[in-house]
Image (cartoon, grey):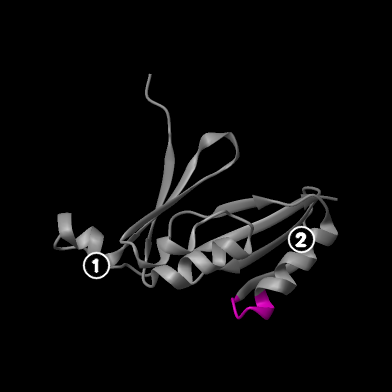
């Protein structure tokens, strides 16, 4: 039976994209900054992958980045304080905070930060 193995994203600027995910703690070698394709293995074996726009155009010459997005990545933190600290650290590195940390009615501390390509990354922890 087929199973989802990876989540792929298109990077405008590979080094900038990878820097954001390194700041979140992913182990991505520095050598990946100069590649057209990069990936990181997540807990449980799922892979997060990035391709440059040039790589995508190599097999889809009509590719154009569309405004908006249809997905969000979610990052579980160990505590509400870790949500706050991570958002503050990422903001200090220059990443846009889309939604400041707040206590959601469903029982989580929640926040959203945009990566270098504008993809929303939600951070959360149980209250």
Residue 60 in view of the camera: no
Give the quadrant of residue 23: bottom right
Give the quadrant of residue 56: bottom left
- Which residue matches tag 2? 83
State left or right for residue 93 relative to residue 36.
right
- Which residue matches tag 1? 64
Categorize mark 1 by other alpha carbons within 10 Å: few (<14), some (14-19), many (20+). few
Q: Is residue 27 magenta?
A: no
State left or right for residue 60 relative to residue 80.
left
Q: Look at 43% across and 35% down and name the residue there.
A: 5
* Residue 109 vs residue 41, the one in the foreground: 41
- Marks 2 and 1, how far apart at CA: 34 Å
SS at mark 2? helix
Q: Which residues are magenta?
A: 91-96
State left or right for residue 19 relative to residue 101.
left
Categorize mark 2 by other alpha carbons within 10 Å: few (<14), some (14-19), many (20+). many
- Residue 3 image offset from top left, x and y in percent: 42, 28
- Residue 100 image offset from top left, x and y in percent: 72, 71
Main SS of the magenta segment? loop
Q: In the image, is residue 2 above or below residue 81?
A: above
- Residue 67 image offset from top left, x and y in percent: 37, 70
- Residue 126 image offset from top left, x and y in percent: 81, 47
Q: In the image, is residue 91 above or below residue 10?
A: below
């Amino acid at each position: 039976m087929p199973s989802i193995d990876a989540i792929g994203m298109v990077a405008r600027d590979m080094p900038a994209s990878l820097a954001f995910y390194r700041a979140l703690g992913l182990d991505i070698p520095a050598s990946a900054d100069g590649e057209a394709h990069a990936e990181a293995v997540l807990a449980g074996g799922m892979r997060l992958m990035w391709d440059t726009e040039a790589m995508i155009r190599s097999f889809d010459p009509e590719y154009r980045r569309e405004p908006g997005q249809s997905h969000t990545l979610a990052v579980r933190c160990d505590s509400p304080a870790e949500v706050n600290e991570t958002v503050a650290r990422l903001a200090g590195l220059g990443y846009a905070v889309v939604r400041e940390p707040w206590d959601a009615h469903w029982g989580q501390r929640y926040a959203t930060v945009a990566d270098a390509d504008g993809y929303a990354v939600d951070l959360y922890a149980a209250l």
